Image (cartoon, helix red, strand yellow):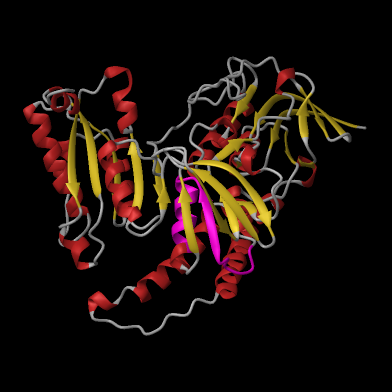
Amino acid sequence: MKKLDVDVAIIGTGTAGMTAYRAAKAQGARTVVIESGHYGTTCARVGCMPSKLLIAAAEAAHTMQHSAPFGVHAGQVRIDGPAVMERVRRERDRFVGFVLEGVDSFADEDKLRGHARFTGPHTLMVDEHTEINAARIVIATGSTPLRLPALENVGPGIVTSDDVFYWEDLPKSVAVIGTGVIGLEIGQALQRLGVRVKLFARGGSIAQLSDPEVLRSATRVLTEELDIQFQSKVVGAVQDGEEVALTVSDALGEEKTERFQYVLMAAGRTPNVHGIGLEHTGLERGADGIPLFDARTMQCGTSHIFIAGDANNERPLLHDAADHGKIAGDNAGRYPDVRPGLRRTPIAVAFTDPNIATLGASYRQLCEGGKRKFAVGAVSFANQGRSRVMLQNKGMLRVYAEFGSRRFLGAEMIAPRAEHLAHTLSWACQMRMTVDQMLDMPFYHPVIEEGVRTALRDLAQCLTRGESEVDAADSEPGT
């Protein structure tokens, strides 16, 4: 058996692991990375990049099919399923190739293949071939799609989002379990590409939204196009030939069975923290099995172990995984000199149409502990100028600010081109700008951003009047 002594061992070579490796090496630490699966990040291989390729094809089909209101008639649209999926796979492989080039740049002696598990606070066993004694360790093991017990061991018709991007043709029908970002993005894209799609949600949630007004707007907008069954529970499924007979109960407990070519489990992802011997680390863990850690330093308790990326489930998004990795790698490299790293304003986007985006403090966070004394401004995009020009006049934006300081706190929205609106607002949030400072910024005409100005003006008036969400609610009879 081979034995290694290193300063830093990093488990995983996804976005967080690769970034942590570079950061630890930059500190002069003797560093190794350990990978049990394929090289290549979740984003590049089965996540954000291939999903956007599928969405791009769906947008092209949707534009051609809905050009008549502009007086433009495209004729019959033909969707070539094999060609759609071939481009998704080809371009996906190209993105993965860029990641592999990054891994190839690591020194060969710094890379180990195999499953790593803790055998002690400082020791790792990689398969049965290498024992590592590490002064510091970074857990960057990523995540995998959440699997529902009711759909286990059914057959090949039960798939996860990881499987979708290996399809060679578009299916005839898909049931999507979950209305989170993954389920909505893939579900809407497949629907627009001619697939019969039905989405099932256990509750009433839509993506990452917590603002009840924005959630109502999102539900109304999306159900105009998509068949979404809320308050549904998956009872079971049976593989019957090339189809799956899926049984679901509704809010009244009534069961119904429908047949689909595939049932896509899109109920989220779960951190890969099980089966790596955390019980041998001495770390305190939460009910979910994830070690307790400091989100500013990525340090687990006061130990020499750090956790980064999807593995810690704090913000399972690529840009945050990269930040996690940089912080964890820096601190592992210079331990015990542990320092807080740069944490940026939270931002999340679902690339549905319209986009769904959140940034800064969410409505739910601002309401925690009965602290609903914040001001809210809003705008509907139903009659917003540029939105109507593009026939994309759907959705709404709600923005939040602090009384007294008038500091901008965050926003939630379903809006046309919200991916861009969210970036502008997240920058203002990170710069701790006031609503008045934001209104002093330039707004061109005619652009979607004029809707942001309308919402900020409404927010400024609410701040001046001293009106908050809870004030309005308290004034209503029976509340």
Q: Is residue 104 left or right of residue 49?
A: right
Residue 369 at x, y percent in the picture: 32, 17
217 relative to 60 in the view: left or right: left
Instruction: Give the quarter of the image for residue 131.
Output: top right
Name the residue nearer the viewer: 219 or 359.
219
Residue 3 image offset from top left, x and y in percent: 87, 30
Q: Position of residue 388 (x, y in %)?
A: 19, 64
Q: Is residue 58 left or right of residue 313?
A: left
The residue lying at 49 percent from left, 45 percent from top is: 178
Is 87 included in the stretch rendered in magenta? no
Seen from the viewer's position, the closer of residues 9 and 53 is 53
Image quadrant containing the N terminus: top right
- The percent position of residue 126, horizontal first and vertical second, equals 82, 34
Front-most of residues 405 and 220: 220
Q: Is residue 181 magenta?
A: yes
Q: Residue furthest front?
A: 254
In the displayed structure, 183 sits above or below 57; it is: above
Reply above or below: 68 against 129. Answer: below
Nearest the eye: 297 or 27: 297
| Residue occupying image coordinates x 15% and y 22% | 474
Q: Residue furthest left?
A: 465
- Magenta range: 167-190
Q: Give above or below for 462 relative to 185.
A: above
| Image quadrant where residue 29 sits | top right
Q: Is residue 477 shown to the viewer in this render?
A: yes
